[in-house]
Amino acid sequence: MIKIQNLSKRYGSTLAVDDLSVDIPQGEILGLLGPNGAGKSTTLRIMTGYLPPTSGTILVDEHDVTEASLAVKKLMGYLPESAPLYTDMLVYDYLSCIADVRGISSQNKISRLKELARLCSIGEVMHKPISNLSKGYRQRVGLALALMDDPPILILDEPTSGLDPNQIAEIRSIIREIGKQKTIIFSTHILSEAEATCDRVVIINKGKIAADGSADSLKSTLSDSTLRLRLKNAQSAEVQSVLEAVNGVHQCGISAEGNELAVEVKSASDMRESIYGAIKSRDWTLMEMVQEKQSLEKIFRELTTEAAK
């Protein structure tokens, strides 16, 4: 449904988006991850027609964003990081006004506002001033705004920024519900949110794609498995020699802690059985063996820090 090809955006001497290409099929929930300044918001703004690209193209349902921006905008609902709300209005009056601007007929407007109130869980605040709402409720009103004319694509820029954990969980639940019927692209640097919500994750660093895939596939292919051991009655040099000889081990780090050795073994896969077999053949005492859980956070750090280079 969305095809981004060789997209670049330059601000003076700064290259914010650097030859980015990605296809987003219909019905997918895509998380755009990256540190601050990675190019996430710039990419979304180009996608929605708010910014022109320096080079490259974006096709939305075969419409070029730069050549047919009005047709593209009719297919999209967009919620920027700061929702554009008129805080002196009641929620109902504001959404009613937006419905009129969007051309929703008076016969359909009431039913649409009721549906949005249910979907975005704002029924209890529909007759309250927007200025009195918490940020979590304001974000929900912003979602209702983006969904007003039922677009097939929803683009959300940091939708949970500044929210507390309960509010984040509520917005996440709404996104999953909406995602049953729509294509959703949202940017975030909250990794647990992307892992819990997205079908697919694209990690951007310095305007380039650093990784692309489901959270599970990234964890299984992009990060070494780490096994932590504690051994007694063992000598550091011998342990290092024996464990590094095990097929599949990439690295073995050892430090002394009292009368025990703390050992960290890195490999491409789960090596517990092979490592245990190597230890069992020696007179060492295995005090502890812990497989470190792979995490999207670890992968994110590896791909977006200078040390990873």
Image (spheres, rainbow, N blue to C red):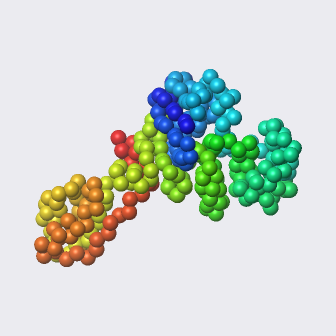
**Image location (x, y in percent) of residue 245:** 14, 58
In the image, residue 254 above or below residue 42 = below
Position of 16 with respect to 110 (left or right) is left
Write the residue at 71% across / 55% down: 120
Nearest the eye: 229 or 47: 47
Where does the C terminus fall, quadrant-wise? Answer: top left
Position of 127 with respect to 40 (left or right) is right
Write the residue at 74% across / 42% down: 149
**Image location (x, y in percent) of residue 73:** 67, 33
Where does the N terminus fall, quadrant-wise? Answer: top right
In the image, residue 182 above or below residue 238 = above
Give the quadrant of residue 152.
Answer: top right
**Image location (x, y in percent) of residue 184:** 59, 46
Write the residue at 39% across / 52% down: 217
Nearest the eye: 173 or 233: 173
Give the quadrant of residue 238.
Answer: bottom left
Give the quadrant of residue 293.
Answer: bottom left
**Image location (x, y in percent) of residue 93:** 86, 48
Nearest the eye: 61 or 297: 61
Write the residue at 49% across / 37% down: 23
Position of 151 with respect to 193 (left or right) is right
Q: Is residue 229 visible?
A: yes
Nearest the eye: 234 or 270: 270
Position of 65 with respect to 95 (left or right) is left
Q: Is residue 133 visible?
A: no
Please count the marks in the image.
0
